[in-house]
Image: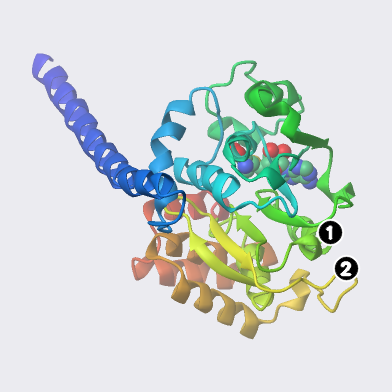
Amino acid sequence: MQSGAARTLRRVWGRSLQLLHADVALIASDAVWSLPLALYRLSGRRVARFSQLYRAGVLRQQFERSRIPGMTALTERAYLKWHAQEELTGAGAVVDLGSWLGSTTASLAMGLAANPRRSTRTSMIHAYDQFRWEGWMDIHSPPTRLGPYKPGDSFRPEFELVVKRWRERIAVHEGDLLQETWRNGPIELLIVDAMKSWELASHIVRELYPALLPTSGHLMHQDFSHCFTPWIPLISYRLIDFLVPARDIPRSESLVFRVASAVPPRASRFELGRSSFDDFEIEQAFRHWLDVTPAEKHSGLRAARVLLSHYDGDIDQAESLRQSFTNRGLLNEFHINTLHAVMDR
Ligand SMILES: C[S@@+](CC[C@H](N)C(=O)[O-])C[C@H]1O[C@@H](n2cnc3c(N)ncnc32)[C@H](O)[C@@H]1O
């Protein structure tokens, strides 16, 4: 009995050390950017503007985490703060689709508040959500101050609490995005974490993409390599002449795009529903994204390819793709388990 307890203790201790080492290594890999960041700031933002400077901000996001719950990775939060602080010029609005408890909105607001450009002093963040709890949120939910919530409960007060420090810079749009239209001028930064169906995806593209500012505008897809949203890599491939991949956010499913040229307005030649993608374009699209994204995103993209067939009702193709990817070791354990949970019910 005693030796069993000792074995358990040793196992737990060994696991904690492993985690500690992993975290320390990750924190160190972000913290090394603090020195170049200091140089960048001391030089009046003239030298050392490396693309990874934002990672110096991961530590601050770690400290803020207990006050700012969310599903976002610390790298995503640090990037959003950086972008709002260093990249935004004030030429357009910032739009956050699917704010949930406010982690993206708060990171953006933190950055906007520190942006030195006069022209951004009146810039607003438009935060969109239904603010209604859904059952699937339970397993992703960090501790909340006003929860726990049950399906249908409003979590708007929790969002308000999280973003209170920056509230005057935030316009909240509560309701179903499918009913929303955009009438607030050009958009300089669009963060999308609400493309949860083909219908939402088409609506968001038609309503908001045409407002994206060419050249300085950016779009961040938080679900780019998420296995449940295969339409995102497909639609992104279709629109690649307008929105070009600009930056990968490590340890997340996010990919940031730069607006190379204006996306044509609604009622344009783009018909983006599922039926508009044939097998050839689907294979081209997934092959393209596997070629140009880091390996970290590949398991999610492949699982998304499997789930596309599953959602289509093509069970044989979904199964054959899953077997092929699994046998070749191309899916990680998380995606093997997720596909099992979705497909083998
Ligand atoms: C994955 S969560 C977003 C997580 C969030 N970005 C964060 O910072 O942790 C997706 C959000 O999209 C919202 N959403 C989904 N469908 C929506 C719709 N049709 N209209 C408005 N919001 C929607 C949900 O309420 C949910 O808060």
**Residue at the (62%, 40%) spot, across then down:** 112
**Residue at the (62%, 85%) spot, across then down:** 280
Horizontally, residue 190 falls left or right of residue 10, namely right
Q: Quadrant of ligand 1?
A: top right
Residue that extends furthest to the bottom in the rendered view of this protein: 280
Mark 2 residue type: Arg
Between 271 and 331, the one lying in front of the other is 271
Mark 1: is the Cβ under 8 angstroms from ligand 1? no
Spatial CA span between label 2 and label 1: 7 Å
**Residue at the (60%, 67%) spot, across then down:** 233
Question: Would you name the residue on which mark 1 appears?
Answer: 207
Mark 1 residue type: Glu
Q: Mark 1 falls on what kind of element?
A: helix
Mark toward the start of the polypeptide (2 vs 1): 1
Horizontally, residue 220 falls left or right of residue 188, namely left
The image quarter in which residue 26 lies: top left
Residue 97: in sight, yes or no?
no
Question: Would you name the residue on which mark 2 appears?
Answer: 266
Across and down, in percent, residue 159 comes to: 68, 27
